[in-house]
């Protein structure tokens, strides 16, 4: 089986099965062998690894992963791609395809069944319409995941990797930064895909920390504070947090907490680091705030 990572083979396979890319599933197939090699190299895949791929499509990245990894488990929602994958991956005996919605799959059970419960590496060219739910599920499910190396929309890559003060800094940067060390791998132009997406893309690598980056007494409460702070980015923290009854604090209580932390009491969320959000969350909780 010849590699799929080029335009001629991709078109040949799509024609053979009389298929076209489905927009509703975010299908944009990679046709750039340089980018495919970069993804596998950045993920640091070795024969010791079990890789979880999300959305194998017609099997392009899967072929590269099957050659580099010990085992590949790929979850694909589109059942019309099953015969295509049997064909394009017929030479590999280390690939398992699960035909399901990744948001419904028990990732912990996958790790148990295919990797004796040991950490897996996630490698994927993600469907852009559900990037954030997929990343958050991978982190929040508590499944054993060592790293996540994924192609995402460039704008989302920037939101994952930027720090305080940047226009792209927000709840996604903080959620990702709580669980993992983010790194940019490379930018990828629309011409590397069939069909071409109408946005730029980028590959990011998120290496999971053994324990979350900061200690906080109530994770859920901190993320409620973070979400509220960035819902109305231009508002001061004291205004936005006191407006959310689920947080249950007054303007004065927020201002006092900020002053205690040595932060200007008119500060906005976009200037606070993850460590500062954790500290603010702990202080507000001690002042009697309650998350309903
Ligand atoms: N890996 C292929 C490649 O690089 O050429 C295809 C990547 S394409 C951007 C995204 C893939 O994710 C598609 O094959 C799509 O059908 C699949 N997909 C979309 N939503 C999904 C979901 N909820 N669960 C699993 N796969 C999904």
Image (cartoon, rainbow, N blue to C red):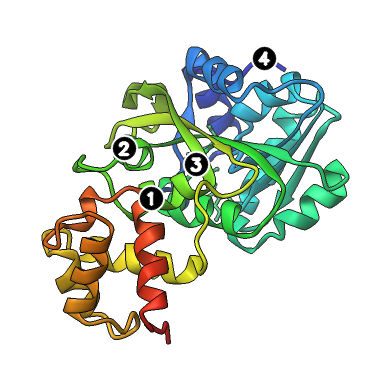
Q: How many marks?
A: 4
For discs 1 and 4, the disc positioned in front in the rendered view: 1
Q: Answer with mark 1 or mark 4, whichever residue precedes in sequence.
A: 4
Dot 3 or dot 4: first in sequence order is: 4
What secondary structure is marked by label 1?
helix
Residue at mark 1 to residue at mark 2: CA–CA distance: 12 Å
User: How far is disc 2 from disc 4 in space, using C-alphas?
Assistant: 39 Å
Determine the CA span between mark 1 and mark 4.
47 Å
Q: Where is residue 25 drawn, in percent x and y?
A: 47, 51
The residue tagged 3 is 126
Which quadrant does the C terminus fall into? bottom left
Disc 3 vs disc 4: which is toward the camera? Answer: 3
Is residue 24 visible in this depiction of the protein? no
Give the crowd class for mark 4: few <14, some 14-19, many >=20 residues within 10 Å. Answer: few
Q: Residues within 10 Å of mark 2 (few under 14, many from 20)?
A: some
Q: Secondary structure at mark 4?
A: loop
Residue assigned mark 4: 2
Q: Quadrant of residue 226?
A: bottom left
User: Taking 215 as reference, is 44 above or below it?
Assistant: above
């Amino acid at each position: 089986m010849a590699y799929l990572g080029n335009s001629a083979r991709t078109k040949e396979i799509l024609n053979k099965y009389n298929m076209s890319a489905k927009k509703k599933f975010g299908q944009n197939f990679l046709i750039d062998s340089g980018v495919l090699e970069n993804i596998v190299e950045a993920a640091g895949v070795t024969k010791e690894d079990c890789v979880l791929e999300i959305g194998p499509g017609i099997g392009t990245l899967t072929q590269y992963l099957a050659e580099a990894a010990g085992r590949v488990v790929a979850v694909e929602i589109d059942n019309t791609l099953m015969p295509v994958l049997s064909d394009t991956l017929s030479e590999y005996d280390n690939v398992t395809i699960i035909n399901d919605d990744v948001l419904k799959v028990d990732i912990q059970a996958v790790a148990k069944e295919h990797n004796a419960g040991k950490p897996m590496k996630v490698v994927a060219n993600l469907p852009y319409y559900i990037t954030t739910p997929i990343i958050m599920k991978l982190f929040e499910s508590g499944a054993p995941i060592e790293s996540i190396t994924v192609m995402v929309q460039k704008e989302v890559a920037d939101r994952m990797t930027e720090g305080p003060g940047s226009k792209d800094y927000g709840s996604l940067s903080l959620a990702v930064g709580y669980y993992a060390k983010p790194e940019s791998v490379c930018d990828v132009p629309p011409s590397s895909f069939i069909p071409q997406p109408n946005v730029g893309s980028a590959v990011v690598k998120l290496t999971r920390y053994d324990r979350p980056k900061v200690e906080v007494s109530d994770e859920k409460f901190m993320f409620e504070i973070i979400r509220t702070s960035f819902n109305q980015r231009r508002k001061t923290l004291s205004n936005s947090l006191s407006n959310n009854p689920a947080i249950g604090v007054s303007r004065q209580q927020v201002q006092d907490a900020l002053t205690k932390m040595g932060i200007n009491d008119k500060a906005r969320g976009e200037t606070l680091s993850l460590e500062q959000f954790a500290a603010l969350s702990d202080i507000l909780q001690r002042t009697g705030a309650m998350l309903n």
